[in-house]
Image (cartoon, rainbow, N blue to C red):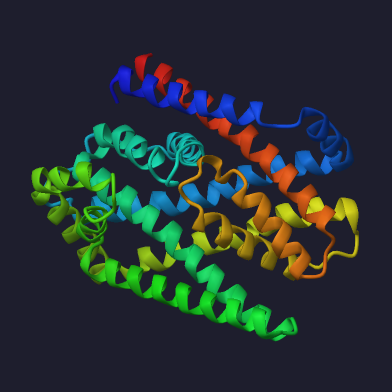
Amino acid sequence: MKKKYQNGFFIFGFVVLIIMITQLDFAQVWSGLKNAGYWFFAVLVLWIFIYMFNTASWYIIINGVCSQCEDKKPAKRAVPITWLYKLTVSGFALNYATPGGMMGGVPYRIMELAPRIGTERASSSVILFEMTHIFCHFLFWLASAIVFVFIHPLNFFLTIVIGLTIAFTGLGIWFFIAGYRKGLANRVMNLMRHIPFVKRWATPFVERHREQLDTIDTQIAALHRQNPKIFIGAILLEFSCRIFSALEIYFILLVLMPEVNFVSCVLILAFTSLFANLLFFIPLQLGGREGGFLMSTTTLGFSASAGIFIALIVRIRELVWTSIGLFLIKINKKAEQA
C-alpha cells in the first residue's frame, strides 16, 4: 500500500480514538479497573487468542481463493500468517473506529493484501471473510434466541422480541447463503445505490467496476461450489470466536458474582452485540453497546450495575486493542520500507 494511504488510515483512526478517549469519565475508568483487578488483564490476553481464530479463518479463505485461480496467475508474494495476524488486528481496529463497521477495515485490508495476491483475489478474500464474520453473527444470534426460549420464562413482550429476532436472523442467514452461492459483491453494491448519501458514490463506482465485481462474485460462487470444506472451516472458526468471546463477560462478572453461569454470559453477549450492530452507523458503537449490556443483563436477572460494569471494562478493552491495531499499521509500514 502507498505510504500516503497508510498514513491516512492511521491518522483517521487515531483522531477518532482520541475523540472516544476524551468522552470517558477517567475517575469511573480508574475505579472500574481497580475493581476488575487481574481479570482485566485476562480479558486483554483473551483477545490475543480470539484474533488468532479470526486470522485462521481468513488465512484458509485466502488459500482457497488463491488455489481457485492457480491456473490463471500465481500469487505475487506469500502471505505469512504472522503478517496476516497484524493485518487482522489493525483491520478490526479501523472497523471499530469508523461508522458502518466495515468502512475502514475492508478497504484497508484489500489495499494491504493486493500487492501480495492481486487486487481481485484480495477483494474476493476480504469480502468472503467479512461475509463469513457477519454470517456467523447471525448464526450466533439465532442460536442464542432459541436457547433463551428454553431457559428463560417468556412474557408477551419477550415473546414478540424473540420472534422478531428469529425472523430477522433467519432472513439474514438466507441472504448470506444466497450470497455464497451467487456472489455478494454486486448485491451489496446495488443495495448501496438506493441508500441516501451513499448512492452518489455507489452508482458511479458500480458502473466503473462492473467487470471486477462480476469477477469477484464468480470467484466466491465457484469456491463455494468446488471447495465447501473451506467455507465450513471458516464458519466453524468464526462461530467459535463468538462462543469464546463470551469468556470476556464471564471473567468480568466473576469479579461481582463467583457463581455466574457461562450460558448467561453467552446470551448477554448475543443480545448486546445484536442491539449494538443495529446501531452500526455509530463509531465504536458508542452508547449502543452500553445500552445493550444494560438491557441484556437486567432481562437475564442481573443488576443494572453489573451491566454498567461490563460495558465499562469492555469499552476500555476495545480502546486498548484499537490503539494496538493502529500501532500495528505503523509497524506494517516500517516493515515494508525495510
Does 234 sit above or below residue 228? Answer: above
- Residue 44, image x and y in percent? 70, 40
Q: Quadrant of residue 22?
A: top right
Q: Is residue 312 left or right of residue 336?
A: right
Q: Residue at x 50, y 70 (%)?
A: 139
Residue reaching furthest to the top: 338
Q: Is residue 72 left or right of residue 9?
A: left
Does 231 sit above or below residue 147? Answer: above
Q: Residue at x 60, y 81 (%)?
A: 146
Q: Quadrant of residue 171?
A: bottom left
- Residue 32, image x and y in percent? 83, 39
- Residue 134, image x and y in percent? 44, 59
Is residue 84 visible from the viewing direction of this image? Answer: yes
Q: Quadrant of the N terminus?
A: top left
- Residue 229, image x and y in percent? 36, 68
Q: Is residue 140 left or right of residue 257?
A: left
Q: Residue at x 81, y 35 (%)?
A: 28
Is residue 77 visible from the viewing direction of this image? Answer: no
Between 24 and 227, the residue placed more toward the observer is 24
